[in-house]
Amino acid sequence: MTRAQNSVARPSLAWIVLSLALAAAFLTINRQTSMSAPPWVDEVMQIDAGLNLAMGKGWVSSAWFSQSVHEFWAANNPLYTLLGSAWIRIVGLDPVAVRTLNLLLALAAAWLIVSTSRRTGLVRTAAASLALALLVLTDGSVSYIYRTGRADLVPLLVVVLLWRAITLEQGTRGREALLFSFAALVPASGLHIIPYIAALLVLELAITRRRRTRDLWVMAAGCMAGGLALMGIFLVQGVLRSYLAQTVASGYNILGAALQAVVIRDHAAVRRFIDQLAALLPWNFVRILARDASSLPLIAFLLASIFAARGERRWSLRSPAVAGVVAAVLIPLAMLAAGRYMVYYGWMGALPVAVAFAVVLDRDAREGRWGWWRAGVATGALALLLGMPLQIWQQVRHTKPSQYAEIERIVDEATRPGDVVYGDPVLYYAAKSRSLEFFSTSYAGGHGYPHMSEDERARFTAILVPPAVAKEAQEKVGGAWVRSAIYPSPYGSFLVLWRRAPIGPSGE
């Protein structure tokens, strides 16, 4: 161990008790309010193949926009879906229980970030460690992920595991094996984290001037091995082309958008490529950066620390405050240049900022700058409030605890045993838990994606969707439909039940 590592005290009993209490409070609060955010299209699409596998129906999806339910499912981030399948086998189809997986992943990531920061000597005081844990768990983008059931906690955790492995002492037994193994998980956890990892390594090189040539080769080999294994599985299953179309050639990254603009050349493809470039314009970049409001106070505090250090002649380009501010700008720019930087990708910039903030807070305490330390605590408290607590308040003020039970009641009243339902994603868990054959409105997504086969269309017996998408749903499914009932949705608007029009004596 290094001298910095030796200087970090082992966790005391009080610290362990406090950590367990924090984890329990985090789980309790989020589980109690988890269904204030309804099941939605991204959540359903990313868990569906795993849920079907757990139910014995195979690795297929009746929610994916570009693949048939008869195909082996192939898309970005299959590691989350596989992990979700194993979790569903344990907890069942209850949506609160399923979403708890992301809560546990968030706790694991926070623990790894804090323990790695302490082990490397970046953070040594209990107060800074607690602040870092809270900032990770309540960050606006991180909480958006675990409160809406998206898959992004798995790539986040893989990145943190890589960081933990790369910060082990050179020569540590098994270090390179860990680096290789964690890097091998990258393709299955999401190809979009490759440019993110590259940006972090460039940032580290610029700040510390530390070259990691051998580590880079080990990680590159692991990533390539994982990618080849994943593509080999998809090749054997006959869906490799579909996987590549949805990842490398997807319109959601700059390369794919450019390819589509050149090859397809329709208005939608060209517009998508132009929008990718427009996101790099200064005013759009600032708007995108502001999506995660909880990071903004931390960035402001780091900037103030830099200016204060310059005034006191202790400023350094390699300081943690500089690293945090550069990360806040460099990472979103890198991700926008590679593709996009949605709110659920905001953790990529937020986590380095949170670590840099905790390091500055820690140093202020150890060096006796108590005025700055108190300002840092107040800033951290503001950042905390702008994250998870604000999201919970915004969601629960328009909802009631029993609202998801109303969705289950709607499914019970609107459907019959044996129905094949084409419906809104909000119905997903309720329909699946009742053994209904359910197709989400995201299935066969239209806009150039493959249509349903005629045999598939003929099997549908019910459509249950909001009025705004009823026409599109009927066009996708085909045939004549009659409105049968209308139900007020607890999440807003209405859900309209349509059933097939009876066929007359003439067969028409």
Image (cartoon, helix red, strand yellow):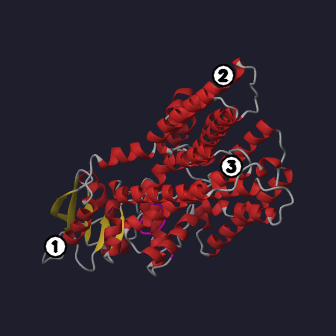
Res 129 visible: yes
Residue pictured at 50% horizontal, 69% vertical: 84
Numbered disc 2: secondary structure: helix
Q: What residue type is labelled 1?
A: Pro
Q: How many residues crowd around disc 1 within 10 Å: few (fewer than 14), some, or many (20 or more)?
A: few
- Residue 117, numbered label: 3
Whole-percent x, y for residue 383 in the image: 49, 38
Q: Residue furthest bottom?
A: 56
Residue marked by disc 2? 308
- Residue 502, numbered label: 1
Who comes first in sequence, dot 2 or dot 1? Answer: 2
Residue 78 forms part of the magenta stretch = no
Residue 64 forms part of the magenta stretch = yes
Q: In this view, does 60 lie above or below 335?
A: below
Q: Nearer the viewer, residue 42 or 237?
A: 42
Who comes first in sequence, dot 1 or dot 3? Answer: 3
Whole-percent x, y for residue 125 in the image: 65, 44
Whole-percent x, y for residue 464 in the image: 26, 63
Numbered disc 1: secondary structure: loop
Residue pictured at 65% horizontal, 37% vertical: 327
